[in-house]
Amino acid sequence: MREYSAYTLLKNALSGNSDWKPAWRKPDPKPSYDVIVIGGGGHGLSTAYYLAKEHGITNVAVLEKGYLGSGNVGRNTTAVRSNYLLPENHRFYEHSMDLWENLSHDLNYNVMFSQRGCLNLAHTPGQLDEYVRRGNALRHSGIDSELMSVAQIKKLVPALDTSGSARFPILGGVMQWSAGTARHDAVAWGYARGADRRGVDIIENCEVTGFLRDGDQVTGVTTSRGEIRAKKVAVAVAGSTGRVMKLAGIETMPIESQVLQAFVSESLKPILDTVLTFGMGHFYAAQSDKGGLVYGGALDGYNSYAQRGSLPLVEEVHSEMLALFPSFASLRVLRSWGGLCDMSMDGSPIITTGPLPGMYLNAGWCYGGFKATPASGWCFAWTIAKDEPHALNAPFTLDRFQRGILIDDKGQGATPNLH
Amino acid sequence: MSPRRATSGGLIDRSRSIRFSFDGQEFTGHPGDTLASALLANGVTLLGRSFKCHRPRGLLAAGVDEPNALVTILRGEAREPNIQGTMLEIYDGLKVVSQNRFPSLGLDVGAINQLGGKVLGAGFYYKTFMGPVIGPLKGTRFWMFSEHFIRRAAGLGKAGTAADPSRYERMNAFCDLLVVGSGPAGLMAAKAAGEIGKRIILAEQDARFGGSANWSDETIDGQPASDWAAATVRELARMPNVRVLPRTSVWGYYDGNTIAALERVTDHKPSPRRGEPRQRHWTIRAGTVVLATGAFERPLVFPGNDRPGVMLANAAERYAAEYGVMPGEKIAVLTNNDGAYRSALALREAGCQVVAIIDVRAEISETARAIAVRTGAEILTGRAVTATEGGKKLHCIKVQAFDAATGQISGDPRSIDVDCLLMSGGWSPVINLASQAGAKAEWNERLQAFLPPKDTDGWVGAGGFNGTFSLDAALSEGFAAGGGTDTGLLPATSSDDLDIAPAPVFEIAAKGKAFVDFQHDVTSDDVRLAHREGFQSVEHLKRYTTLGMATDQGKTSNVPGLAIMANALGKQIPEVGTTRFRPPFAPVTIGALAAERYGEIRPERLTPMHDWHVENGATLYSAGLWHRPMIFGLPGETVEQAYVREARTTREAAGIADVSTLGKIAVQGPDAADFLDRIYTNMFSTLPVGKARYGLMLREDGLVLDDGTTWRLAEHDFLMTTTTANAGKVMQHLEYLLDVIWPELKVTLTSVTDQWAGASIAGPKSRDILAACVTGTKVDNETLPFMGIVHGEIDRAPVMICRLSFSGELAYEVYSGAGHGTHVWQALTAAGKPFGLVPYGLEALGTMRIEKGHVTGAEIDGRVTARDLHLDWMLSKKKPFVGSMMMDREGLVAPDRLQLVGILSRDNIPLNGGAHIVEELDRDNPHGSIGHLTAACYSPTLGQYIGLALVKAGKSRHGQRAFISDPLRKRFGPVEIVSHHFYDPEGKRMHG
Amino acid sequence: MIITCPFCGPRDSSEFVYREEGGRTRPDPSSTDQAAWNAYIYERVNTAGDHEETWQHSGGCRSHLRVLRNTVTHKILDVTLARETGKVEKPA
């Protein structure tokens, strides 16, 4: 009874739900694998899934130091979009979008990808032109984007202050209708189950403590559950990249780990049916199917591995929220949390072979890792399987910083906390 | 309507009545009542509907742990959803409605979900709604169709769209000791610390100080505990070093002992007094925090435990003792510990009939038995409740023999008619704040509870928080936490010495739905399903079943959920782990967090001449934080007509613009010239005193940071100008270099943006206008050549004038002290009148700079190099400068980079910034972008629509035809790519 | 977090701006060692633990501070003025 469907749901209900099997096995690690993926988050799991599905490589272990999906895949605001400025990002994130659209079927797991749109609000004429530039860039890459008038925005999101008397009046917005949200945990679990069904070993509570080396060549890892050898070792550990790379003797990376807070309000009847961003700050919000407003703002702005945020940022995020939604003042925030963002030097990711022989690296996701999950795993699996990048991730090299071939969507330069 | 007010008792004021309405029906209560106690006193036992299955629910708890009784408060147009009835004090005119029901609380069609039964088990939605793989509902469509209905069924209260008219306040406070919680332990801590002169803040989340003293029948210092508490609070309030904060929920424990608290200042009043906010957001920096937050009683998990009428034993005790309300007439108690016996007695004394005390333990203590005898109840040990009956209201329980060691149920069920069942599954210390502070909880086998660790440097615990449940010990711990040393000062108490350590029984597993998380309808079967499917770690359990994620954040459900999972795994509870608590402890009003920033999230920046602009017909628009004139339109003019007129008049006669927003930095000191050489790409040490120079700055990574002119006022005194948008960023960049990298340089930097008012006066008549009003200096070409600086006066105000041009005309920037700005501006406009001077706004300014090919922030977007902007000539080869080693990297000199070009509209239709440029036009499938327009205007000089653009290999494309492709604004059409120097490329006019 | 500015005393972290990881060496302005420049601009140690970093008291005296702070606990261990400990590779 492995397929999920309305039929199996009903059938199981009749037998008291006692026949359901674990979504994934809990195997002990084998002494060796073809590929080890370090990191049982969204990207690591999707990498394992696509290694098995697309490349027939099933002798794979995913090593997770805590519980599966304990990193950013379970700590984000669930937005999925591809509305970037630069063509390198268009191609990559649009591939992700294509995968998202069929992901529930592909995984036989409802990841609840809901294409309810992502609207970027503009507040000055200059900003509107900037957003239109980006929207047009998307259209020229074959991605949907449209300009919305204040009247259209008001109709879509009646709770917004569109009176024009706000400190930053809304002048218009640019909408990507194909964007939306997905159920974050389901993405991790769906990929885990999908990979497991294809033979991948998912090993939780297994912390990597070092790398096995033969000269420069990486030949495996030491872990809290013993030595495990592998022909190829792939690293997909997001905010822990610096820590893990140090275990391999690589002392510096073009990455800073910073904390990003997110919030959820008490559950409400539907009031916000799209993903929405504020142009004069970093505020963004959506409403989950359970009814909670899920929202966040800027990074706290300093290096952190603590998964805990600071109070000034809490105040800032909520101030920005009310700048858009004066009626939300009487609502209440229920929960907050912090995730570790692996901020790269140009705000774009790294998916590459190396930097050591036998090693493969996937990192630098900044704010944007969740939406990238399918394409990240897909491209990383390709890179691991073929020992060279796919055209989609070829620009996301590790040496692009030194060479000045930057993919700087926000134009902020080597200032990670501003991306 | 059986529950009712007891004839006496409670801490309410029976002499006065309060009228309020619930779901449109009028009720009365007394001062001191919560909505929950008042409704209960009126016999209302159905208060809410659960989230998923819309099951009818009554009160489970009496405080901040209540999961069921959520209501929406109506205040005029504004709505406050999801307020716990147990935390809401009633006031005259209070209007509340129930939630998550249609059409009414009693008859809710959503209850049909209950028929879904086991189909709607934990995580069912992950397994279905995926829809067909092909056909019209493929992809995400079927899910989105289903989701539409799910979203409408889900959700609790309804938010409004009318702005919240309430005022919120913020407050900062500092103290030696913050005491959180005012039960006996907290009060004792505050008293001890207060008496030795420490600065104290005492915060209590309820309206009434005293915590457990308010419902306990014990005595402290020879008086009833509640009297002792009230007297102690009065005493504390009189101390000058103590601040007492009732109705204040301490919700966040942040780094550096920074504590966040929410004070509900006037939520309990019909209308706030003048000046009173609704709520106050406190940021408290505390030397030490005393956590005296007590403990929450846990429910037991058994079939039918969610029926209205089943409540926590201590909650019932509180309703009776604190509010004088009898939660039922015929009461039974189900417990695994001695504590519930005290609750039973309290209800007996309030006038209820206690029918039976059902204890899952085979043996009970003598003390407990003695109390049970006093209640008159039948004592049923070694038994448990295995079912409850009654639709929306309990009327009967089924009791069977139960083996606490094995969990086995045996024998025939016995029915007992009751209208209220009290349950107690032991106590969980409220360790949330300690957990937020980073403390790892430790499992205590005796108390069957997670306790905080000892010894931290930021906080100390006291009382129930520590798992200390006896009154004497709680007082003694509080005393020590407050720094008290002479234990002789501790008050004497009378207490019954009940040991509340429970039997390790969390669930009575029998047939039927047994609830763990009441609000989210998570049952014990759901927990077991999660186990079966491998969602076994505490976080997976939580996320898969949504246990503990409701508005009460699992205050009553976390430990029972863990216990059931541990049992399924055959492990001990601590092996399953505990979830880390995160802020807030209890939901926090968003308006309070944003207090005093409401509607004014950022400062507004206005130039010294702002009022003049407004009075003289300027249309303003915002640029960052600034408000700047866009046009000075005449009646009937369109924006385009206005800026074209302004620009044309400026080029033909003269115009004046406000440039006060430019960033201005005084760079002073013996090494100032050296410093400027390091940070600009071009030389400044060679600049003579009394002259200005255009400068370009790169970032460390070799891309363009900013541009502007810098004026040498004296040997060691420079005035740097930056673009408006980058003023702050440039200042930070320079300060960093000076302070961190080159501290040996003797230079100081001062931001003087706000100290100088700037007026740019441009056009062929500008020199004549200055000559007509400037005194103290000549302004002829010899005295004031291009890029020269003079000092003089305009209408007695000192001014500094630099001859430089953004517009390409003969032009000057006139700087005066900000206080003289409007005066000088008016003098200039008066002097200019005979010459036809007009004020011009940003649109005309932009038009003239586009004609001239000057760049601004639209082009300097953080991705361009000096070469991209054809500013290579500014890159000195004689010296290193910031960015010089990075600017020649391969990616930054690639031939296909976007480069600055000019664009001519070839269809005589306006162009817009943000449009893209393509070689082949395809309106239906736009593709092949080679760049984009950064700025556009109608050029009065050229008589056509023009723009600037960044285009791939743009320099090599001059003279080529291309197309504008702007699908977002549906503008397509032919253009020509030309040089960005549209106008007077040799600069004859400005040098003239 | 509360940062004790050597000039201004203990202040809330909201008065400060995190500038960057400290302990990095900016090559001498005239250095043509491209690798050293690349490392200065793009490479970070990103320590999990005691971390040297530069903050600016932007809402106060505007001094840059060298802060030793634990990135796991957020405990601040030491604060000095950056200009007194500035790490600059002096020309030989």
Image (tube, rainbow, N blue to C red):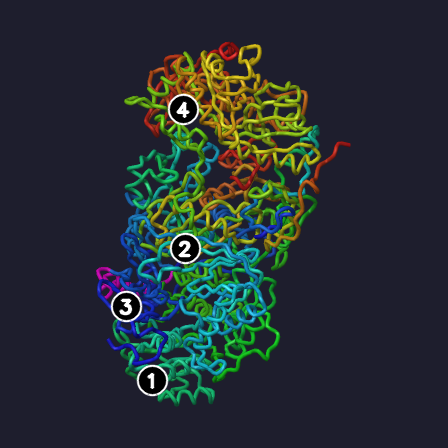
The nearer-to-camera label among 1 and 3 is 3
Between the C-alphas of marks 2 and 1, the distance is 41 Å
**Is residue B325 visible from the viewing direction of this image?**
yes
Between the C-alphas of marks 4 and 3, the distance is 61 Å
Q: Earlier in the sequence, mark 1 or mark 4?
A: 1
Q: Chain of mark 2?
A: A
x and y percentages locating residue B165 in the rendered image:
33, 50
Label 3 sits on a secondary structure element that is strand
In the rendered image of this protein, does residue B938 appear above or below residue B346?
above
Residue type at mark 2 is Val
Residue type at mark 4 is Gly
x and y percentages locating residue A161 in the rendered image:
33, 43
**Is residue A4 visible from the viewing direction of this image?**
no
Q: Earlier in the sequence, mark 4 or mark 3?
A: 3
Between the C-alphas of marks 3 and 2, the distance is 30 Å
x and y percentages locating residue B168 in the rendered image:
40, 53
Residue denoted by label 2: A333
For the point 35% across and 37% down, which residue is it? A170
- Residues indicated by labels 4 and 2 sit on the same polypeptide chain: no
Q: Chain of mark 1?
A: B
Residue denoted by label 1: B354
Please say whether residue B857 is one of the residues in the magenta stretch.
Answer: no
Residue denoted by label 4: B841
Quarter of the image containing the N terminus of chain B?
bottom left
Label 1 sits on a secondary structure element that is strand
- Residues indicated by labels 1 and 4 sit on the same polypeptide chain: yes
Please say whether residue B108 is one of the residues in the magenta stretch.
Answer: yes
- Residues indicated by labels 2 and 1 sit on the same polypeptide chain: no
Q: Which residues are magenta?
A: B102-122
x and y percentages locating residue B452 in the rendered image:
55, 68
Label 2 sits on a secondary structure element that is strand
Residue denoted by label 3: B18
